[in-house]
Image (cartoon, helix red, strand yellow):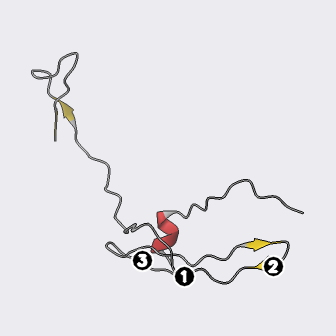
Amino acid sequence: MTVIANRVCNISLSTLKSAPYLLTKGDSIYAKVISTNLYGDSEVYSEVGNGAVIENVPDSPINLTNDLETTTDTVIRITW
């Protein structure tokens, strides 16, 4: 008998954006869940979700410059 300690399922954003899901920005994420134990599979739970919405991961900023006239021990001003 296998005991599953982790009750969390993580699915990467890249997986959801590729086939067969092909979700795009603004699409909501829902899942149908089946639990399995020694007695077999449960019925399919109705769609569940927490209201998550597909967003795009922004590109990293480029050409950042530290503004030395404003930067102090407690403040950093970055321009681009």
Q: CA distance from mark 2 to mark 1?
A: 18 Å
Residue at x-position 68% and y-position 84%: 43
Q: Is residue 27 left or right of residue 1?
A: left
Name the element at disc 3.
Answer: loop
Name the element at disc 2.
Answer: strand
Q: Is residue 56 left or right of residue 74?
A: right
Residue at x-position 9% and y-position 21%: 69
Q: Is residue 11 above or below residue 24?
A: above
The residue under label 1 is 46
Instruction: Please identify the quadrant where the C terminus is shown.
Output: top left
The residue under label 2 is 40
Residue at x-position 90% and y-position 63%: 1
Q: Give the mark nearest the N terminus, 2 or 3.
A: 3
Q: CA distance from mark 1 to mark 3?
A: 20 Å
The residue under label 3 is 23
Q: Give the mark nearest the N terminus, 2 or 1.
A: 2
Estimate the x, y position of residue 68 in percent, counting from the top left: 14, 22
Nearer to the camera, 46 or 72: 46
Amino acid type of the residue tagged 3 in the rendering: Leu
Nearer to the camera, 70 or 42: 42
